[in-house]
C-alpha cells in the first residue's frame, strides 16, 4: 500500500472518522492487490495495524 493512502487512512481514524472512500484506490488495482489494500485498511481501522 502506498504510504500516502495509508497515512490518510490513519489520519481519518485518528480524527475519529468512521470510514474512507477508497474506490479508485482499490478498483484500479489487480484483484490481489485490491484485496490486500482493503485488508490493510480494515486492520488500520480495527487497530491491528499502525
Image (cartoon, rainbow, N blue to C red):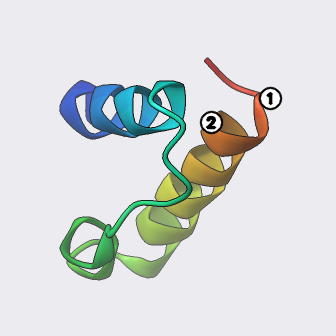
Count of number-bearing discs: 2
Q: Residues within 10 Å of mark 2 (few under 14, many from 20)?
A: some
Where the C terminus falls, by quadrant?
top right
Residue 27 in percent (x, y) is at 29, 82
For residue 10, which quarter of the picture? Answer: top left
Between residue 46 and residue 49, name the one nearer to us: 46
Q: Is disc 1 in contact with disc 2, using a CB cutoff of under 8 Å?
A: yes
Q: Which residue is mark 1?
A: 48
At horizontal 54% and vertical 62% (from top left) the residue drawn is: 38
Q: Check the image and report above or below for 18 versus 24.
A: above
In the drawing, does residue 5 fall left or right of residue 40?
left
Q: Which residue is mark 2?
A: 44
For residue 43, which quarter of the picture? Answer: top right
Mark 1 residue element: loop
Mark 2 residue element: helix
Q: Residues within 10 Å of mark 1 (few under 14, many from 20)?
A: few
Residue 33 in percent (x, y) is at 44, 62
At horizontal 37% and vertical 27% (from top left) the residue drawn is: 11
How far apart are labels 1 and 2 at the CA level?
Answer: 6 Å
In the picture as drawn, the residue positioned furthest to the front comes out as 16
In the drawing, does residue 28 fall left or right of residue 46?
left
Where the N terminus falls, by quadrant?
top left
In the drawing, does residue 48 fall left or right of residue 33?
right
Residue 7 in percent (x, y) is at 32, 25
Amino acid at each position: 500500500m502506498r504510504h500516502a493512502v495509508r497515512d490518510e487512512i490513519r489520519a481519518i481514524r485518528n480524527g475519529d472518522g468512521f470510514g474512507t472512500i477508497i474506490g479508485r484506490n482499490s478498483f484500479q488495482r489487480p484483484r490481489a492487490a485490491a484485496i490486500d489494500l482493503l485488508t490493510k485498511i480494515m486492520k488500520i481501522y480495527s487497530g491491528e495495524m499502525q
